[in-house]
Image (cartoon, rainbow, N blue to C red):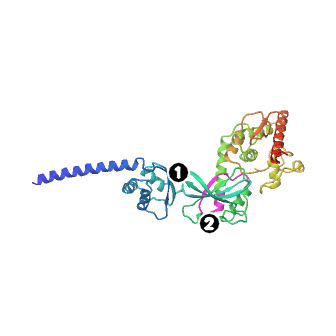
């Protein structure tokens, strides 16, 4: 009798173990298989959320097929206690395993509302925008100048109080250190004083994610560190026989290149012109350096250069001085830095605007004069068009 009972118990145990193994295999397949989501969605994870609450939300939005398997999978992979507050983009057909990773990984929101403060060369403005998960594109909701006297739009005040709002500071290539500091002082979601303007050229133009209440000084330090890293890496990989001997001089050249062209593909060619001029003892003769000598980087000139300004002997007037100015004239981006240390190999000594946003390059003065004549014709035509053709 006891032998029969033991035999039956063993048989039952084997059946249970086999069934459990089958269930685990099936659940694992369900956990890692493509999910039912037909269109990307944003999932909000408030502070203090639990896997149970998130699994219910995901099920209601049609992102997962089983709340239980979602929670078991999170527990089995040791991620059930790692929920991060924020708003996260869940792509279509994302598996439960992928969704668990999305809501437990970095904690950096990838969805929802974003406040972007763009500090530019000619102007700065704040954008309030929201990600449309269906298209993965941001839709602008408001834009304003925080330095103006006008009040911020109501939607800005609303989203500032939202827990999942993301903040970014976007610095344009070619912005001066004064412009960056002035812009940061107008960012009311940052804290801390900036007692002085950092050295020109040593702040990296880039996009910086910040949190409300972040320190302005610490953000400046991040910019400075990033620029130092870029400059150091570029200098290590520099071309031979450059007409400058230090990374600091390369940064000066990069800033001039940055201010002369916004066309990425042209930067190495522009660099080659200035390098060729330095090698041949020809003055750089570049307007942006003269302008910097007048404005000292505090805003834009807002008009053309006068003859007297082109003739004035200042440390930044490269029509008068030999070589380069004493400091950078803006904060160059990485592409301009790389162009400065690895210029194109050309015989160009001149360039002028060509009317398309780029420049026409020339080896000789006669070729350059022809290009200048064409550019003046374009300018005259544009002036006629703006006057209605009269």
- Does the magenta segment cover residue 311? no
Horizontal and vertical percent position of residue 23: 31, 50
User: Magenta residues?
Assistant: 199-220
**Residue shown at the point (77%, 56%) measured from the top left:** 299
Q: In front: 123, or 15? A: 123
Work out whether mark 2 precedes mark 1 in sequence or the reverse, and give the earlier one.
1
Number of the front mark, 2 or 1: 1
Q: From this viewpoint, is residue 242 visible?
A: no
Q: Secondary structure at mark 2?
A: helix
Task: Give neighbour class at mark 2: few <14, some 14-19, many 20+ (Cα, 10 Å).
Answer: few
157 shown above or below 332 = below
Quarter of the rendering containing residue 301: bottom right
User: Could you tell whether 4 is left or right of 140 in the image?
Assistant: left
- Does the magenta segment cover residue 208? yes
Q: Secondary structure at mark 1?
A: loop
User: Could you tell whether 356 is left or right of 88 in the image?
Assistant: right
What numbered label is drawn on residue 157? 2
All told, the count of numbered labels is 2
Quadrant in which the N terminus is drawn = bottom left
361 shown above or below 33 = above
Task: Give neighbour class at mark 1: few <14, some 14-19, many 20+ (Cα, 10 Å).
Answer: some
Horizontal and vertical percent position of residue 173: 70, 50
User: Could you tell whether 86 is left or right of 341 in the image?
Assistant: left
Inter-mark Cα distance, 2 to 1:
26 Å
**Residue shown at the point (85%, 36%) measured from the top left:** 369
What numbered label is drawn on residue 183? none
The residue at which mark 1 appears reads as 134
User: Could you tell whether 364 is left or right of 229 in the image?
Assistant: right
Q: In front: 251, or 207? A: 207
């Amino acid at each position: 009798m006891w032998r029969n009972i033991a035999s039956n118990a063993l048989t039952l145990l084997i059946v249970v173990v086999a069934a459990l193994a089958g269930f685990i295999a099936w659940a694992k397949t369900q956990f890692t298989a493509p999910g039912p989501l037909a269109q990307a969605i944003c999932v909000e994870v408030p502070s203090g959320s639990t896997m149970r609450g998130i699994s219910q939300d995901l099920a209601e939005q049609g992102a997962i097929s089983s709340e239980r398997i979602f929670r078991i999978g999170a527990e089995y992979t040791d991620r059930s206690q790692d929920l991060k507050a924020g708003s996260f983009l869940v792509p279509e057909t994302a598996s439960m395993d992928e969704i668990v990773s999305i809501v437990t990984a970095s904690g950096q929101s990838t969805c929802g509302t974003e406040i972007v403060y763009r500090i530019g060369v000619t102007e700065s403005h704040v954008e309030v925008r929201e990600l449309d998960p269906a298209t993965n594109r941001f839709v602008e909701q408001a834009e304003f100048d925080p330095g103006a006297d006008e009040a911020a739009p109501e939607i800005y005040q609303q989203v500032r109080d939202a827990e999942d709002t993301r903040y970014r500071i976007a610095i344009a290539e070619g912005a001066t250190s004064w412009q960056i500091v002035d812009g940061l002082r107008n960012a009311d979601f940052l804290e801390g004083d900036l007692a002085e303007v950092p050295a020109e050229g040593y702040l990296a133009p880039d996009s910086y994610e910040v949190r409300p209440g972040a320190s302005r000084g610490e953000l400046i330090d991040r910019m400075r560190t990033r620029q130092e890293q870029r400059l150091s890496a570029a200098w290590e990989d520099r071309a031979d026989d450059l007409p400058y001997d230090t990374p600091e001089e390369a940064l000066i050249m990069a800033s001039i290149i940055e201010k002369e062209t916004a066309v990425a593909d042209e930067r190495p060619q522009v660099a080659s012109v200035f390098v060729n001029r330095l090698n041949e003892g020809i003055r750089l003769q570049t307007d942006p350096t003269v302008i910097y000598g007048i404005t000292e980087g505090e805003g834009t000139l807002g008009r053309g250069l006068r003859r007297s300004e082109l003739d004035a002997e200042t440390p930044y007037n490269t029509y008068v001085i030999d070589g380069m100015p004493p400091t950078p004239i803006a904060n160059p981006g990485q592409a301009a830095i790389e162009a400065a240390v690895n210029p194109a190999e050309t015989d160009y000594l001149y360039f002028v605007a060509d009317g398309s946003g780029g420049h026409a390059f020339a080896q000789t003065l006669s070729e350059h004069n022809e290009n200048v004549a064409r550019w003046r014709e374009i300018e005259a035509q544009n002036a006629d068009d703006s006057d209605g053709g009269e």
